[in-house]
Image (spheres, rainbow, N blue to C red):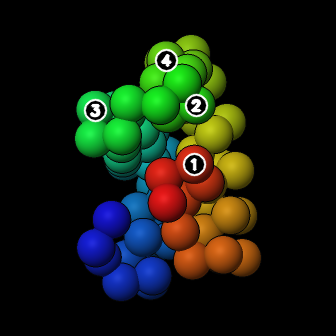
Amino acid sequence: MSQSRLVQLLLLLIPVVNEVTEWVVRWSCAIEKPTVVHILIAILMIPFGVVVGWVDFIWCLLFKHLIFAA
């Protein structure tokens, strides 16, 4: 994602936007870099998108990027 960190965090705080952002980021990452980890995470985003979204919010606060997307 090329947004500023504040925009990333605000988008991750909004529940529906969080899940849609997670789907878009994970699937685009899986298409761009088709490794087993990226594809597995993209598939797991379908049932567990909300949980991974909150983990991503915390990860983004700590490390300034989304987990498994860097």
Q: Nearer the viewer, residue 12 or 23?
A: 23
C-alpha span from label 2 to label 4 = 10 Å
Q: Which amino acid type corresponds to the residue marked 4 in the rendered image?
A: Ile
Q: Which amino acid type corresponds to the residue marked 1 in the rendered image?
A: Phe
- Tell me the residue that label 1 is attached to: 68
> Compared to 30, does 9 lie above or below?
below
Q: Quadrant of the N terminus?
A: bottom left
- Tell me the residue that label 3 is attached to: 31
CB-based contact (under 8 Å), mark 2 and mark 1: yes
Label 4 vs label 3, nearer the camera: 3
Q: Is residue 65 among the parts visible in the rendering?
A: yes
Q: Which amino acid type corresponds to the residue marked 3 in the rendered image?
A: Ile
- Tell me the residue that label 4 is attached to: 43
**Mark 3 or 1, nearer chain start:** 3
Residue 57: horizontal and vertical position, in percent?
62, 61
C-alpha span from label 4 to label 3 = 12 Å
- Tell me the residue that label 2 is attached to: 37
